[in-house]
């Protein structure tokens, strides 16, 4: 490992200090450790949350120099160069507008906008401002996923023919799960189409390529949920039977058949109210020479089918993660010694900050989020038409008044 003696300090501001804001903060701090040789040294300047106690705790834990309950102060702070937006979806557009107008580089959690239209506007704002952008599609950074991408790009699987992606999560399976902002149309916008289908489609874009057309359907299984207490809990928290309830305003389930531009046939499926899978973000890829499977619940493993000419090894082989796979050695030196979710966030944060240092946009940017939004738009049209819809590559090309 060659140590970069040229150190680059970047001032960090984080907005929204719930679970994801804390994960972003730890990831930035870990960049200086796990990617020490890069020379990148994040400086934790200021964090914001509308709940003062949460902001104070985040400051104490993550070593921020300041905290605030006014997110505008994060963007206005002269030492902040980088802004992470981990607030509820309905605040993303306003925050990105302010950050890009101030010339700050922006990392926004998916699905970026509440709707495809908002995502398109957010992409436009960053493009016009000329800032580096990034999106929280952290599953793509798993070392075994990056190795799968490498195998596909090297042609080891031959010509791809099939792709199946899914994200099944039980976080909304309990009817007593709280009616948090994720279930509200005015705050989250879309349901699982924005929340977790975004990961499925992004992974497919990365591994296979652009999507040509889709046919899709949706469903809401649990139509009422207990009301939450503001500022407390997460979207995993539970209420009690008999608590006051409110209506769920977006979808629990989306299923989609897809055709890729390169001829690959596929399907996507997501649900937050399913019983059984805890966090099954997974995919299967088939080609003319081989196949592979990956599941986040076993993120340090990759099932690979590459039969030899003799036919002796004609079956799936289970590969265990280790330092020979991309970035795994940043976290531990041994085969079979696993890494975890927040390690993926650290790899993600490094790639974002390295983009800034290099002045070269890496994926996934807001432009990649816009490609996803165009696929979402086609799915939404299919819900109404009941038929195949073509993915239209639309952009946003004029400002909207603040």
Image: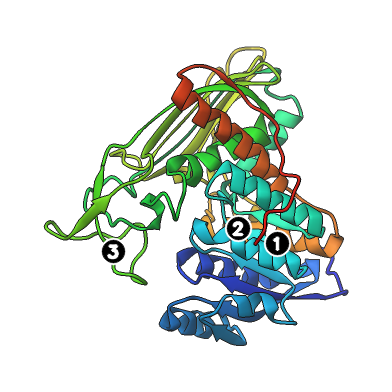
Q: Residues within 10 Å of mark 2 (few under 14, many from 20)?
A: many
User: In terms of sequence position, does the residue under pointer 2 or pointer 3 come before the other?
Assistant: 2
- The residue labelled by disc 3 is 228
The mark closer to the camera, 2 or 3, is 2
- The residue labelled by disc 1 is 350
- Residue 82 pos. (x, y %): 71, 69
Element under label 2? helix
Name the residue at 54% across, 37% down. 200
Is mark 1 in CB contact (under 8 Å) with mark 3? no
Q: From the viewer's perspective, is residue 190 above or below residue 149? A: below
Q: How far apart are marks 1 and 3 (CA)?
A: 35 Å
Q: Residues within 10 Å of mark 1 (few under 14, many from 20)?
A: many
The mark closer to the camera, 1 or 3, is 3
Left or right of 192 in this view: 23: right
Q: Is residue 182 visible?
A: yes
Element under label 1? helix
**Image quarter in which the C terminus is found:** bottom right
């Amino acid at each position: 490992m060659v140590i970069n003696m040229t150190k680059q300090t970047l001032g960090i501001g984080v907005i929204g200090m719930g679970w994801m804001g804390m994960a972003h903060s730890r990831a930035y701090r870990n960049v200086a450790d796990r990617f020490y040789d890069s020379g990148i040294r994040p400086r934790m300047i200021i964090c914001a949350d509308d709940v003062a106690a949460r902001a104070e705790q985040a400051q104490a834990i993550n070593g921020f120099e300041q905290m605030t309950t006014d997110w505008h102060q994060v963007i206005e702070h002269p030492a902040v160069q980088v802004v992470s937006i981990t607030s509820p979806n309905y605040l993303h557009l306003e925050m990105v507008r302010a950050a890009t107008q101030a010339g700050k580089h922006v990392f926004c959690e998916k699905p970026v906008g509440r709707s495809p239209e908002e995502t398109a506007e957010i992409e436009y704002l960053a493009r016009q401002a000329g800032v580096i952008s990034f999106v929280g599609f952290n599953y793509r950074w798993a070392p075994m996923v990056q190795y799968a991408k490498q195998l596909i790009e090297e042609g080891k699987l031959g010509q791809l023919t099939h792709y199946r992606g899914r994200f099944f999560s039980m976080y909304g399976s309990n009817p007593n799960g709280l009616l948090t902002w994720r279930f509200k149309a005015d705050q989250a916008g879309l349901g699982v189409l924005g929340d977790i289908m975004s990961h499925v489609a992004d992974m497919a874009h990365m591994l296979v390529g652009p999507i040509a057309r889709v046919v899709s359907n949706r469903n809401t299984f649990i139509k009422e949920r207990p009301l939450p207490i503001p500022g407390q809990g997460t979207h995993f928290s539970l209420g009690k039977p008999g608590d006051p309830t409110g209506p769920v305003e977006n979808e629990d389930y989306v299923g989609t058949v897809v055709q890729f531009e390169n001829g690959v046939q596929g399907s996507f499926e997501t649900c937050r109210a399913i019983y059984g899978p805890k966090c099954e973000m997974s995919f299967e890829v088939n080609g003319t020479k081989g196949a592979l499977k990956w599941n986040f619940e076993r993120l340090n493993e990759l099932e690979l089918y590459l039969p030899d000419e003799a036919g002796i090894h004609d079956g799936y082989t289970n590969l265990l993660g280790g330092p020979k796979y991309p970035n795994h050695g940043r976290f531990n030196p041994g085969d079979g010694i696993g890494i975890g979710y927040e390690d993926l966030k650290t790899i993600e944060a490094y790639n974002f900050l390295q983009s800034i240092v290099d002045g070269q946009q890496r994926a996934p940017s807001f432009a990649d989020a816009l490609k996803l939004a165009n696929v979402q738009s086609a799915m939404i049209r299919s819900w109404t038409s009941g038929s195949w819809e073509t993915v239209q590559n639309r952009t946003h090309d004029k400002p909207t008044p603040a």
